[in-house]
Image: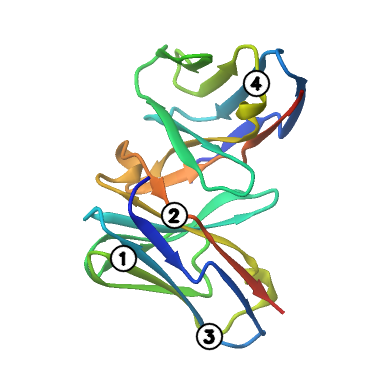
Amino acid sequence: DAGITQSPRHKVTETGTPVTLRCHQTENHRYMYWYRQDPGHGLRLIHYSYGVKDTDKGEVSDGYSVSRSKTEDFLLTLESATSSQTSVYFCAISESAGGYGGELFFGEGSRLTVL
Amino acid sequence: GQQVMQIPQYQHVQEGEDFTTYCNSSTTLSNIQWYKQRPGGHPVFLIQLVKSGEVKKQKRLTFQFGEAKKNSSLHITATQTTDVGTYFCAHNNAGNMLTFGGGTRLMVKP
């Protein structure tokens, strides 16, 4: 398996609190992604990064922000968590752009529950 | 962006039966990738198809890309309990983004 670590793996928080999920990679891949997975919706892209300090929005970016200050770390922040953000969050990495045929390697996932 | 529809959403099969999942698009796809996610696990890349009419095999799995590059299928011959999981197709929606279909969940009765 690719060297991808997500933390925390499980988190329960209350509505209105800030939450940060971390993705750490040891593969030196350029591209990093955050997806959320919900029943009936498959995997939906939140944000992605194509280099240090280079990020862009995905299809469900509202309520989320990201930062990438180092190649190996990609942070996903929920500034004020809502119950609709209860989900399983997957980080993924790829050597070349996923949209252009780059194979994605996924982390183990972070299960977030917002009460 | 363009969407792909995966059918069926769920499939129960008896061990030893064949299984097929389909990925359909209303527009031409530049490429298609397939991933498998075991229950409680994370998606794992299976294969990528790029050429019109392409067929690739991995043991009991056969992947096809339609001639018009608007659909793709994954066929499993003689399913085993180890095939249980959700199978996703994914495609290039725009630029760097890979967009996933809704997935087909396969359940196999021993």
* Both marks 1 and 2 on one chain: yes
Nearer-N-terminus badge (1/2) = 1
Residue that carries the numbered disc 2 in the rendered image: A107
Label 3 and label 2: CA atoms lie apart by 22 Å
Q: Amino acid at mark 4?
A: Gln
* Residue A53 percent across, percent down from the top left: 24, 71
| Label 1 Cα crowd, 10 Å radius (few <14 / some 14-19 / many 20+) | some
Considering depth in this image, is A18 or A10 the residue closer to the camera? Answer: A10
Q: Is residue B73 above or below residue A92?
A: above
Residue lying farthest bottom?
Answer: A17
Local SS, label 3: loop
At 36% from the left and 57% from the top, the residue drawn is: A4
For disc 4, the chain is B
Q: Residues within 10 Å of mark 4 (few under 14, many from 20)?
A: some
Neighbour class for label 2 at 10 Å: few (<14), some, many (≥20)? Answer: many
Q: Secondary structure at mark 4?
A: loop
Q: Position of residue B36 (x, y in %)?
A: 53, 35
Alpha-carbon neighbours of circle 3 within 10 Å: few (<14), some, or many (≥20)?
few
In the picture of the structure, the residue carrying the numbered disc 1 is A55
Residue B28 versus residue A82 in the image, above or below? above
Disc 3: host chain: A
Residue that label 3 marks: A18
Tell us which disc is closer to us: 2 or 4.
4
